[in-house]
Amino acid sequence: MNFEIRSLERHDISFLRDMVYESAFVPEGQKPFPRTILDEPSVSKYVDRWGEQSGDIGLIAEKDEQAIGAIWLRLFDKERKGYGDDETPEIGIAIHKEFRGKGIGNALMRELETEARNYGYQKLCLSVDPRNPACRLYEQFGYVHVGWYDTYWTMEKELV
């Protein structure tokens, strides 16, 4: 499948919100989260003031100039805690359903890791429901399970 990857820009914020929503894993047979979850501080922190914070990195996959997926990372501090420490950004990724399984997630992960290394990040972290099929992607990329938070795994990858 042919697609392009570009940097996430300020005009992409509404798409980033959509992708943050899409990244929320819903097990088979359960109702999706209401979209109002995007306004909860624990979720909105991934989008609020995007690009104004040093170290925000985001990429968008496009096919025929249509955004079909995104990956992003953000560093959190003690006030807005993430799953990593003050020096380890948290990543998120989402691909529209009809485009999954076509190598887009792999390409986005590779490109984000390159950007993160170039920025000087030493490691990355994420949280994932262990029932989420995306766990396989993270494990393929060398992420390891380092703990639990509520019902989610915390995974990390050393970049050096």
Image (cartoon, rainbow, N blue to C red):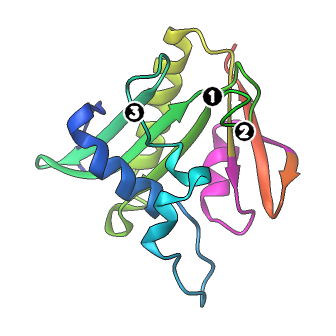
Write the residue at 60% across / 84% down: 28
* Residue that extends furthest to the left in the rendered view of this protein: 64
**The label number, if any, that marks residue 143 in the structure image:** 2
Whole-number angstrom distance, CA of label 2 to CA of label 1: 14 Å
Classed neighbour count for the residue bearing mark 1: other residues with Cα under 10 Å, few (<14), some (14–19), many (≥20): many
Residue 135 location, quadrant: bottom right
* Residue that extends furthest to the right in the rendered view of this protein: 147
The kind of residue tagged 1 is Pro
Q: Is residue 121 magenta?
A: no
The kind of residue tagged 2 is Tyr
Against 113, is 149 above or below? below
Q: Give the range drawn in magenta.
A: 127-146
* Residue under pointer 3: 50
Helix, strand or loop at label 2? It is loop
Whole-number angstrom distance, CA of label 3 to CA of label 1: 14 Å
**The label number, if any, that marks residue 89 in the structure image:** 1
Q: Can residue 2 be spotted in the picture?
A: no
Query: From the viewer's perspective, is the residue at label 2 or at label 1 nearer?
Result: 1
Q: In this view, does 115 lie to the left or right of 42?
A: left
Residue 136 location, quadrant: bottom right
Query: From the viewer's perspective, is the residue at label 3 or at label 1 nearer?
Result: 3
Residue 133 location, quadrant: bottom right
Helix, strand or loop at label 1? It is loop
Total count of labels:
3
